[in-house]
Amino acid sequence: MTAAPPPVAVSSRRPALGFIGGGVMAEALIGAVTGACLVAPGAILVGEVSEERRRVLRERHGVGVTKDNLAAAGAELVVLAVKPQHLGSVLKQLRGRLREDTIVVSIVAGARLRTLCEGLGHGLVVRAMPNTPARVRKAATFWRASADLSVPALGRVRSLLGALGTEVEVDDEAGVEMATGLAGPMPAFVYLFIEAFIDAGVALGLSREQATLATVESMRGSLELLLRTQESPAALRAQVTSPGGATLAGLKVFESEGVREMVDAAVRAVHARAQELGQLALASREPGKDG
């Protein structure tokens, strides 16, 4: 039987988990780790400038909230969850103020390990990029740690990210960046296709409720079949596609409209923009550019 993951924290004298930024992804992580009983809500402290977001996080999740980022940064494991343009000011604020054993996990888009380590003056840093299915513990998170993390520290990072769904430690940062281009926006891409199919069903004459049911349940079943059978998508597609049949007629439209090329272009655009955000995060560290 697989052993239960170790807890993220080992001390009760300070918060187990701190967040710098309390936006959508931070909230998804909070819900995941508390839902997995990995960290108690009372052992989490969120630093967030918005009074409304602090209220929401406190009422929804029972976590501690503060305007003071330094208080949240006193936790044993700290998650940086700010926008790239605000990273410079946050790094400046936290530089030299972290405890020596604090592990920092950044989910800031495009922020490279070198930028983070140098900006914080701290060596225990992890770069990760979960996606929004973390809210239901179904995220795909690719991550890379700096060389200074010990084996126990890496285990604590795996416990945290594993609570979000599937976690994969990659060999280099390029792997994180490439996965960001694919896994990061995937929920948005999927929801776009779902919207389009629902609208098409309504145009045929179905009610929106019927079109939604037909689309969502068919997609859910298709994914479950893929996971259970372990057959390739191409093989499963072939099983549905009879020569001269109705499904083939629809697939021919997708091919003629260049769906594969559009998907490739979209993923490449995300990857390119992620690199631009990395430059924005780097620029925000320069004098006079604190975000």
Image (spheres, grey):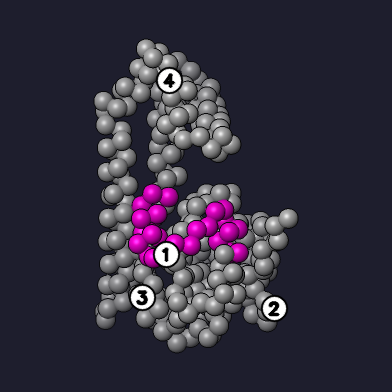
Q: Look at the image and tell me in which quarter the N terminus lies.
A: bottom right
Percent across and percent down for residue 94 are 45, 81
- Which residue shows up at 46% across the image and 58% down it? 142
**What is the CA distance from the residue labelled 1 to the residue labelled 3?**
16 Å
Q: Give the residues drawn in magenta, as a range.
A: 159-183
State the image coordinates of residue 113 (x, y, percent, origin top left).
39, 72
- Front disc: 1 or 2: 1
Name the element at disc 2.
Answer: loop
Q: Quadrant of residue 147?
A: bottom left
Residue at horizontal 51 percent and vertical 64 percent from the top: 22
Query: Which residue does the numbered mark 3 point to in the structure image?
Result: 114
Query: x and y percent of residue 111 in the render?
Result: 36, 68
Q: Check if residue 182 falls in the magenta segment.
A: yes
244 or 195, which is in the foreground?
244
Whichever of callouts 1 and 3 sits on the residue coming sooner in the sequence is 3
The location of residue 36, given as percent across then percent down, is 66, 57
Q: Amino acid at mark 4?
A: Thr
Instruction: Give the residue at mark 1.
Output: 171
